[in-house]
Amino acid sequence: MTAGARQVSASAAASTGASFIAADVGGTHARIGLVSRAGGRLVVEKFIRYVCADYPSLAAILREFIAGLDRHDVQEAAIACAGYCLDGTIINTNLPWTVSLDRMRAELHLSAVEFVNDFEAVAYATPHLEAGDTTTLAAGHQTAADAPVVIVGPGTGLGAAVRIPAGAGHVVLATEAGQSAFAPSSDREVDVLRLLRRHTSHVSIEQVLSGPGLVRLHGALCELDGATATLDSPAAITRAALSGGDARAQQTLDTFCGLLGSVLGNLVLLYGAQGGAYLAGGILPQIKPLLLGSSFVERFLDKGAMRPVLERVPVRLIEHGELGVLGAASWYLERHPRA
């Protein structure tokens, strides 16, 4: 097992001796794991993270991963990815290539390749989180165990899903909340929206709450201040903000975190997520010190008469790098329980 890999419970399926591939595919990285069950638990036997831009297709990444296994019994793959699957093709605006499940199954000689929305997969994994996998951002003071839980995360886009308790199990609702309209909550955010509307009639939430969105937000804030934006990547903006020497980069990250708090509060109210909220995605663990010191919590709670409702809701930041892989595996085994 690679460093950081571990076992998690997977109560949805009976024991199976077969190993299968579980993949968490984003616009920047593809995280691939070989997963099996042993003693009633999921085991990540091997885990590798790939840079998507270095490969001509997802099939090429999986082919390299399979070639490195030195075994021939792997026949199935569960692919977690943002977007929708339409007629066997994944509809996603952030992937560097088209993904056809049928073509990939044929090319790799697999018996099954199935798709799950990436944040739907994360929602399947959240019941298995341990204390060390999260950081509490808002403690809440009354968790409703039988209430929905919302999971949100900025990465190449903005993902969101809802886990709803149902009897002994749960139902997961995949959403495209990131495509809903950006709703500013301050005069300065109204000005940001006005600038972004010069390029498109629909400014979605993920156009400001994502990696590319961080660059747009920085450019808009600089323009509003009459300055020239010299930082042109999420990594550059984040480094400058964390260094403490760039006030505009720090302002960008604080605005980003405040917007995230406002959006998360909206989603908790929309879905009645009194069971709690989780933040995931590739960006937030990298900016954790800034997030903890930002206006995130205050913006999360700032919902007028609904503030006392939100004060009951715990909010946690997920810091488990293999969660998407484990979630895809949990989802797949729920769909295909084996004797």
Image (spheres, rainbow, N blue to C red):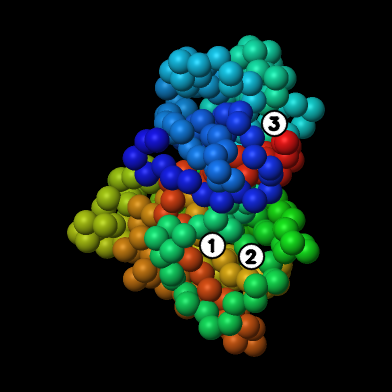
Residue placed most toward the observer, 335 or 32: 335
- Quarter-wise, where is residue 309 in the image? bottom right
Q: Which labelled disc corresponds to residue 149?
A: 2
Q: Position of residue 136 (x, y in %)?
A: 43, 69
Q: In the rendered view, does 122 fall on the left or right side of 245?
A: right
Residue placed most toward the observer, 234 or 6: 6
Query: Which residue is depicted at the point 68% across and 13% down?
Result: 106
Look at label 3 and name its amino acid.
Answer: Glu
Q: Of callouts 2 and 1, which one flags the residue occurring earlier in the amino acid sequence?
A: 2
The Cα atoms of the two marked residues, 2 and 1, are separated by 8 Å
Tag 3 secondary structure:
strand
Residue under label 1, please give it.
278
- Quarter-wise, where is residue 271 in the image? bottom right
Residue placed most toward the observer, 206 or 308: 308
Q: Position of residue 185 (x, y in %)?
A: 56, 72
Tag 1 secondary structure:
strand
Look at label 2 and name its amino acid.
Answer: Val
| Mark 2 vs 3: CB contact within 8 A | no
Vertical side of 188 occupied by 45: above or below? above
Q: Which labelled disc corresponds to residue 194?
A: none
Q: Of callouts 3 and 1, which one flags the residue occurring earlier in the amino acid sequence?
A: 3
Residue under label 3, please give it.
114
Tag 2 secondary structure:
strand
| Mark 2 vs 1: CB contact within 8 A | yes
Query: Which residue is depicted at the point 55% across and 55% down?
Result: 128
Q: Which quadrant is home to the C terminus?
A: top right
Query: Which residue is depicted at the point 34% across and 71% down?
Result: 293
Query: Which residue is depicted at the point 41% across and 42% down?
Result: 5
The Cα atoms of the two marked residues, 3 and 1, are separated by 25 Å
- Quarter-wise, where is residue 295 in the image? bottom left
Extreme-front residue of the structure: 39
